Amino acid sequence: MDRLKLHLEYIRKKMIRSGLENGLQSPKTIRLSKQLDQILNQYQKHEKSPLIMTKK
């Protein structure tokens, strides 16, 4: 989990830097934004998983 959180933060910083340097509509910034979305989805899925109960 900590590794995923660190990766999320790393991509977020790269996206912000790209947005400032290349613009919000640049292909690089958009690619990083999509990558960040995927990582956020994974992170949220892992955050919720301990709450999921299965029937036995």
Image (cartoon, rainbow, N blue to C red):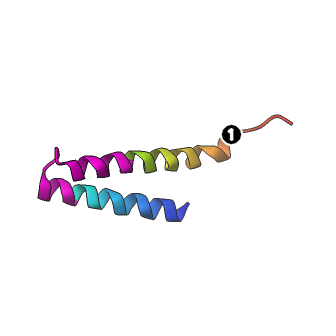
Query: In the displayed structure, does residue 22 sit left or right of residue 16?
Result: left
Q: Residue at x 82, y 34 (%)?
A: 55
Which image quarter holds the N terminus? Answer: bottom right
Query: In the displayed structure, does residue 3 sit left or right of residue 36?
Result: right
Q: Is residue 20 magenta?
A: yes
Query: In the displayed structure, does residue 36 sit left or right of residue 4?
Result: left
> Compared to 12, does 24 lie above or below?
above
User: What x and y, as percent, mark residue 10?
Assistant: 36, 63
> Compared to 47, does 55 lie above or below?
above
Q: Residue at x 34, y 45 (%)?
A: 34
User: What x and y, as percent, mark residue 23?
Assistant: 13, 50
Which image quarter holds the C terminus? Answer: top right
- Between 6 and 32, the one nearer to me in the picture: 32
Q: How many marks?
A: 1
**Residue bearing the label numbered 1:** 52
Q: Magenta region's main secondary structure?
A: helix
Query: In the displayed structure, does residue 54 sit left or right of residue 21?
Result: right
Numbered disc 1: secondary structure: loop
The magenta stretch is 17-36
- Between 22 and 47, the one nearer to me in the picture: 22
User: What x and y, as percent, mark residue 29?
Assistant: 23, 51
The amino acid sitting under disc 1 is Ile
> Compared to 14, does 56 lie above or below?
above
Q: Outermost residue toward the top?
A: 55
Q: Outermost residue toward the front?
A: 27
**Mark 1 crowd level (few <14, some 14–19, many ≥20, 10 Å Cα):** few
Q: Is residue 29 magenta?
A: yes
Q: Residue at x 27, y 61 (%)?
A: 14
Q: Residue at x 43, y 62 (%)?
A: 7
